[in-house]
Image (cartoon, rainbow, N blue to C red):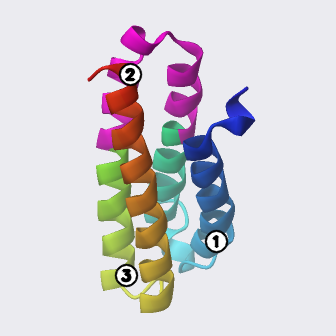
Amino acid sequence: MIDQLIIFQKIYNLLLYIYPTVNKFPKSQRFVLSQHIFNSLLEILKLTIIANAKSKKDRIYEQEQISVYLDIFRIYIRLSKDLNFISIKQYEYIMRCVNEIGKLLQGWKRVSGK
């Protein structure tokens, strides 16, 4: 079941943290940068569910896509920090979560045979 997949749980928890965080962005950015942040994380979650539903050898494409979206998400968060939309403390917490998700993804890829 997907709820038992550790990477899914970490992504879901980050999503729960991100949602109220990006809702505090300046009004002019709520439908620009904040929407991109939220959508990229939702795409990561969706691809994780799809990859988990496939056999080990067939999930490679989705795992690569997760990696790409994770990199995009990192850039959006860095930009948010540089624009002072999030604090250094929030940035550090989010990056710790993202790095942990990245490590879990690498381990998942190894298990899948890539």
Above or below 2: residue 106: below
Query: Which residue is denoted by mark 1 in the rendering?
Result: 23
What secondary structure is the magenta-colored segment mainly?
helix
Nearer-N-terminus badge (3/2): 3
Residue type marked 2: Ser
How dense is the environment of label 2, judged by Cα within 10 Å: few (below 14), some, or many (20 and up)?
some
Residue type marked 1: Asn
Labelled disc at residue 81: 3
Q: Does residue 61 belong to the magenta stretch?
A: yes
Visible in this render: residue 63? no
Residue 98 position, x and y percent, is 43, 60
Q: In this view, does 54 lie to the left or right of 98?
A: right
Nearer-N-terminus badge (3/1): 1
Query: Cα distance, mark 3 to mark 1?
Result: 15 Å
Residue at image point 65% right, 48% down: 9
Residue 46 position, x and y percent, is 56, 32
Residue 43 position, x and y percent, is 50, 38
Labelled disc at residue 112: 2
Residue type marked 3: Lys
Residue at image point 57% right, 70% down: 22
